[in-house]
Amino acid sequence: MTRRKKIWAVVQVSGGNFLEMYDFMVFGYYAAAIGRAFFPSGNPFVSLSLSLMTFGVGFLMRPIGAIVLGAYCDRRGRRAGLMLALVLMALGMVSIAFVPGYASIGIAAPLFVLCGRLLQGFSAGMELGGVSVYLSEIATPGHKGFYVSWQSASQQMTVMVAALLGFVLNRMLTPIQMDAWGWRVPLWIGCMILPLLLLLQNSLEETHEFSSRKHHPSLAEIMRSLAANWQLVALGMMLFTMTTVSFYMITAYTPTFGTTVLHLSSVDSFVVTFCVGLSNLVWLPVMGALSDRVGRLPLLLVATVLMLVTAYPVMLWLVAGPTFGKLLIVELWLSLVYGIYNGALIVYMTELIPFEVRTIAFSLAYSLATSVFGGFTPAISTYLIHATGNRAVPGLWLTFAAAFGLAAALMTRGRARQLAASQAA
């Protein structure tokens, strides 16, 4: 594959990854409106919590999708797996975008939404891992960190586009219009670009590393190898806990946190979210490239320590006197720490995992972290604030995630040294 084709391949797989995350972000941004449309209740907290739990329940399907679609990807090829995941995600998006509200069809409405979320979660279980593995296998020597960073960077474009749409819609529509139908507009836009993304990925080339292999493992071989590498999957889940909790905290949860907890305007919250997406977009490729020079592990250790030391104090400072400026400063700081960590982590995991189970093991570790911790971050944060009365408690949730990441990074040092020695040889 020529350099030009590699750049085009990055665009192709990033496009599918963009839409995969776009739908998740839109649901998180409009959780309150979705809650009122599909989960009506006399208690706003109950409606919001049910909506956020539905947002989180899609992540419960991720481990299943990681195993089923990940095994398919390791057996049939990276291209085939990514195409299948995109088609399934498209079906889930369409089902949520066009289903009538509770007032029209009753209990069937939240059930349709739930099914759509489960389908999206199933497809997303492999999508992020599949994209990361694909990019790592087409990367030019010495630039793998930079190439793989575009998996996460494409998600930040999602954050920016969804936040920009939210800003525009909140300026153009009244709150009543937003509740009635305005929150559906970003979903409709996503459905409109689906055909283009399907066309793009249909012309995607298989990676040379996969196609050049004479033997592709059978399903039984993949499962045996996955079982043999269970400790690596467990460590990967711990490593991914910090990146998933951080990502959903500073992106999907920010509009809800800014408006319902800090009582800032919707416009202010969406502007901050847009700036976070832009900050992430800058830092991720930079840190991915830096990891190519200084190594992955040093960046992981620095980021986890920074999060441990600063997450709760900066949240305390923010809630003591919430303003647009303070929210922006806190979110940009957390964005920098996230960028350092994730810029090194994604490529680190693709290097640690053996080739024959690279997609399924990566995807399973990521999905478990998202399902157990990251995806439920908005719901957990909302509950903890409601239960404790402490508006800064999301900072403690970030601290917990950082402790997981630090412990796992330290436990992978031996394997990282072996990898470095083999690459030097």
Image (spheres, rainbow, N blue to C red):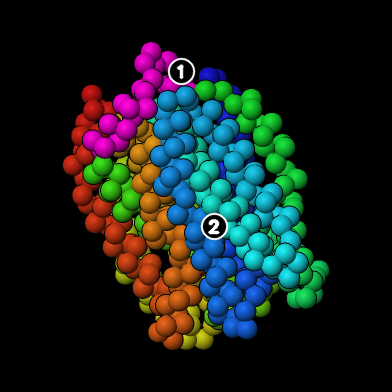
Please provide percent x and percent y for residue 42. 63, 83
Residue 424 located left or right of residue 253: left
**One can see residue 2 in this view:** yes
With respect to residue 372, does 135 lie above or below? above
Tag 2 residue: 279
Residue 329 located left or right of residue 274: left
Give the numbered dot on residue 211.
Answer: 1
Label 1: which secondary element = helix
Q: Which residues are magenta?
A: 207-229
User: What residue is drawn where x is 20% and y is 34%?
Assistant: 418
Q: Residue furthest left?
A: 414
Residue type at mark 2: give it.
Answer: Ser
Residue type at mark 1: give it.
Answer: Ser
User: What residue is drawn where x is 53% and y is 73%?
Assistant: 49
Q: Are marks 1 and 2 in contact (CB under 8 Å)?
A: no
With respect to residue 226, does 375 lie above or below? below
